[in-house]
Image (tube, grey):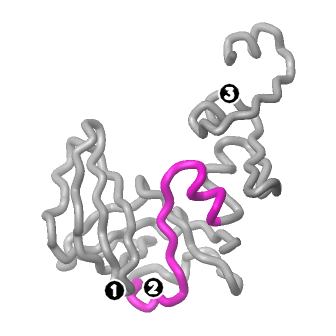
Amino acid sequence: LLALRRTLGSTFICVTHDQTEAMVLSNRIGVMNRGRLEQIGSPEEIYYKPKTKFVASFIGQANFFSEEQTTSFKGATHLMPDRKNGSAWMVRPEHIIPRSRRGSLPDGFVAMPVKVLEIAFLGQDWLTKVEDHCGQHHLVKSPGFEKPPILNDDILIAWEAEDAWTVDNL
């Protein structure tokens, strides 16, 4: 379909439930939830700047941080985007780095203490599931060539403040 679209130079409308297909084939994506259009944008906008929790979790994996969880944040929290009432911060798993609790935090990074619950080797990546002090679970995706955290260890998860995005809790 992509080659055909390029060859013809025509506009296509493709209705799909396959998120990868939508990302590959589209210049613009409309994400619907229960018959309501939640967001229209480029694949990059939909992925990196979703407007709602639904859009963020429908296209890819996402970690959400509520006001209660921010009490344990360390580092450059002043650089995080503004949050309005009823919103949460979202950070993609590939933007989160597992770190030792003993090390220093680079400038511009925010961190949060967590416990390592599960580790899965996916070949090109490690997928690590962690739990914060509120009992919420988060995912960390690290390159497969890096050493993963140790199961049941207490670590920090860290991300650049600019990699956080505010989403509505709709």
Residue type pointed to by label 2: Gln
Magenta span covers which residues? 53-73
How far apart are labels 1 and 2 at the CA level?
A: 7 Å
Residue drawn at 13 percent across, 63 percent down? 150
Please check the rendered image and state whether residue 54 is part of the magenta-colored stretch, yes or no. yes
Q: Is residue 77 above or below residue 13?
A: below
Residue drawn at 68 percent across, 18 percent down? 2
Residue 97 is left or right of residue 167, and the answer is left
Find residue 169 and report its horizontal and vertical position in percent.
66, 74
Q: Is residue 139 above or below residue 30?
A: below
Residue type pointed to by label 1: His
How far apart are labels 1 and 3 at the CA level?
A: 40 Å
* Callout 1 touching callout 2 (CB < 8 Å): yes
Judging by the rendered image, the residue that carries numbered circle 2 is 69
Label placed on residue 133: 1
Find residue 105 and report its horizontal and vertical position in percent.
31, 74
Judging by the rendered image, the residue that carries numbered circle 3 is 25
Find residue 78 and report its horizontal and vertical position in percent.
54, 83
Secondary element at image label 2: helix
Residue type pointed to by label 3: Leu
Q: Residues within 10 Å of mark 1 (few under 14, many from 20)?
A: some
Please check the rendered image and state whether residue 122 is part of the magenta-colored stretch, yes or no. no
Q: Which quadrant of the rendered structure holds the C terminus? A: bottom right
Q: Is residue 119 above or below residue 136?
A: above
